[in-house]
């Protein structure tokens, strides 16, 4: 079975694959860099601030 890909489709496929890999690695890196919080400290934070009032968003900027 022969599959033909145009240059544009191949470029898009590679780009999406690289973005997925980078997102995965960035999430892992950010989780490593986050400070550890004890259970007691976490409960205190939840007691003081309860639930967030809005959803948070993250943006990643990569300098080329």
Image (tube, grey):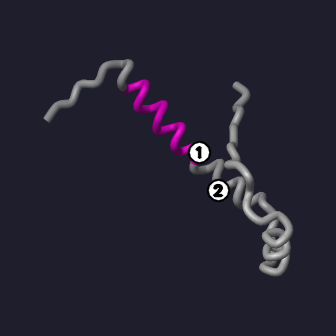
Front residue of this view, candidates 1 and 47:
47
Instruction: Tell me the number on the disc at residue 15.
Output: none
Write the residue at 77% across / 65% down: 50
Write the residue at 21% across / 30% down: 3
Instruction: Tell me the number on the disc at residue 28.
Output: 2
Badge 1 is on which residue?
23
Q: Position of residue 36 (x, y in %)?
A: 80, 69
Label 2: how many residues lie within 10 Å, few (<14), some (14-19) or many (20+)?
Answer: few
Q: Secondary structure at mark 1?
A: helix
* Position of the C terminus by quadrant: top right
Is the stretch drawn in magenta largely helix, strand or loop?
Answer: helix
Horizontal side of 42 relative to 14 (left or right) equals right
Front residue of this view, candidates 1 and 54:
54
Is 50 a magenta residue? Answer: no
Horizontal side of 25 relative to 15 (left or right) equals right
Label 1: how many residues lie within 10 Å, few (<14), some (14-19) or many (20+)?
Answer: few
Write the residue at 83% across / 80% down: 40
Q: Quadrant of residue 43?
A: bottom right
**Is 39 located above or below residue 14 in the figure?**
below
Write the residue at 38% across / 19% down: 8
Magenta part of the chain: 10-23
Is 22 a magenta residue? Answer: yes
Q: Quadrant of residue 7?
A: top left
The answer for how far apart the CA atoms under marks 1 and 2 are is: 9 Å
| Circle 1/circle 2 CB separation < 8 Å | no
């Amino acid at each position: 079975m022969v599959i033909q890909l145009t240059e544009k489709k191949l470029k898009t496929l590679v780009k999406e694959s690289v973005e997925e890999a980078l997102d995965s690695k960035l999430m892992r890196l950010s989780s490593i860099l986050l400070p550890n919080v004890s259970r007691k400290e976490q409960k205190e934070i939840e007691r003081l601030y309860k639930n967030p009032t809005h959803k948070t968003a993250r943006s990643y900027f990569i300098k080329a």
